[in-house]
Structures are given as structure tokens and as C-alpha cells.
Amino acid sequence: RVSCKFTPPSSSSSSSSSSSSSLSPSSSSSSLSTLLSFPSVLAHIVLLFPWRIRVGTECVLHCHTLRVSCKFTPPSSSSSSSSSSSSSLSPSSSSSSLSTLLSFPSVLAHIVLLFPWRIRVGTECVLHCHTLRVSCKFTQLISIVDPKNKYTILQQHPITVQKGDHAVVRLSLLRRCHVEAFSSFPRLGSFILREGFTIIAAGVIKEVILQDT
């Protein structure tokens, strides 16, 4: 939520008048239609609670920062005509996305320690990633790298990580959640680590490692 103000186009925008045609109503109609209508979605779900879902069942859908009431409805006639596209929602194709929600992932991350604190294997803190807040545990300290060149390893498998160190670590997240590698989705791949009200480290996710529950 942020305040905004309508301003006249700047001089730099006049030079890019040729690109302004891409913002015509015809090109943005598909984006606006989702905001001006009540959309329905075809989804692959896994029921986690001993509950019976029927047509007409109502609940609340949480999608990233969105929270909206929803209702289970039968497929419409228009969806039957697109049955060929519904094969893209098969369990095999969506298993990779669902597996991150149904497991307790661990992440391979590059962190910078900002607080005079010593991190060891077994240290627990709270990871904040966009709107996500989840407890985590350091399960492996892989290396300390050079701040100027992340490919230069200064120490392999350190016992502790201290303030100012750039380290590659493995963090286990202690509940089901969804995160991404920074290279594929920067917003869900950057995080801070807190202990109480103190920010102890910041970092980016290099790889998401799925593990059994």
C-alpha cells in the first residue's frame, strides 16, 4: 500500500513515444479484464484436512498477498470446450509446484552476517521472505566466500560464521511454505534473518532443496 500522484509525462517519456503504443487499451484489455470481472480458476488441489468438499462449499483463498472468498462450482460449458488445455493441469505437470507446498523445504543460501553474533550448526532464527515469516535452523555451514568475488572460497565448512562474513549455508525451514531461487523469482528469493527484533543477517536463495515431511 503506497501513496501515489498523477503527474504529466516527462521529457524522457516523449522520446519513447514509439513504445507508448504498447500501452494502448487493446493491448492491456486482457490485464484489465481480470481486474474488472470475477474470475474463476481451474486448479489442482490436495486436501490436507479431514473435510468433505462439495459443489457450493465456500472458503477463503490465500494467494501470496491476496485473500479472497471463493466457492467450489461445477465446470461450465466453456471449460469443456477447453478440455485439451486442461491436460496441462495434470498431477504430473503440477507436482513440482505442489511439492514445495507439501514439504518442509531447505534452502541453499548466500548470507551476510550483519550483527555481532556467532552462527553455528543448529542455530535457530526467523526467516522473513516477502510476506512469509517462518522459523528456520542452520543445518550446514558450507563455506565462507570472498565478499568481492563470491566464487573465491576463503574457508570450507567453518565452525562458526561471524559479523561481516559472507557465507554459503543450508537452512531448513520448519513448516510448509513456498520459496524460490533468487535467479528465478527475486522477490521470493531474497530474505532477512531475525532474532527477536534484531536483524542478524540478509541473503539470497541459491537453490531450493525439497525433503520429505
Image: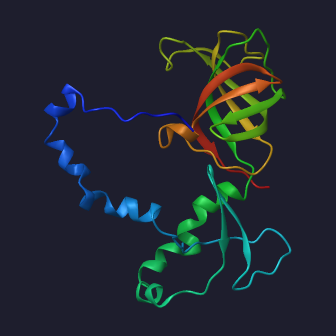
Direction from residue 41 to residue 158 in the image, left or right: right
Q: Where does the image place residue 6, in percent across and percent down from the top left?
A: 37, 36
- Where residue 208 sits in the image (x, y, percent)? 61, 44
Indicate the quadrant where residue 55 lies: bottom right
Q: How is the image coloured?
A: rainbow
Vertically, is 93 above or below 80?
A: above
- Pick whichever, 155 or 111, lies toward us: 111
Q: Is residue 182 above or below residue 110?
A: below
Considering depth in this image, is 133 or 57 the residue closer to the camera?
Answer: 57
For the image, the number of numbered tags is: 0
Residue 157 can be seen, yes or no? no
Visible residue check, residue 61: yes
**Could you tell me which residue is drawn at 74 percent across and 39 percent down?**
133
For the point 79% across and 14% down, the residue is 118
Query: Could you tell whether 181 is left or right of 200 in the image?
Result: left
Q: Quadrant of residue 14?
A: top left
Q: Quadrant of the C terminus?
A: bottom right
Q: Is residue 83 left or right of residue 139?
A: left
Percent from the top left, x then y, of residue 186? 51, 37
The residue located at (73%, 33%) in the rendering is 127
Residue 181 percent location from the top left of the image: 55, 41
Residue 53: image quadrant is: bottom right
Which residue lies at the image location 26% right of the left edge and 58% below the top edge? 25
Name the side, left or right, on which 190 lies relative to 177.
Answer: left
Is residue 121 depicted above or below 176 in this figure? above
The N terminus: image quadrant: top right
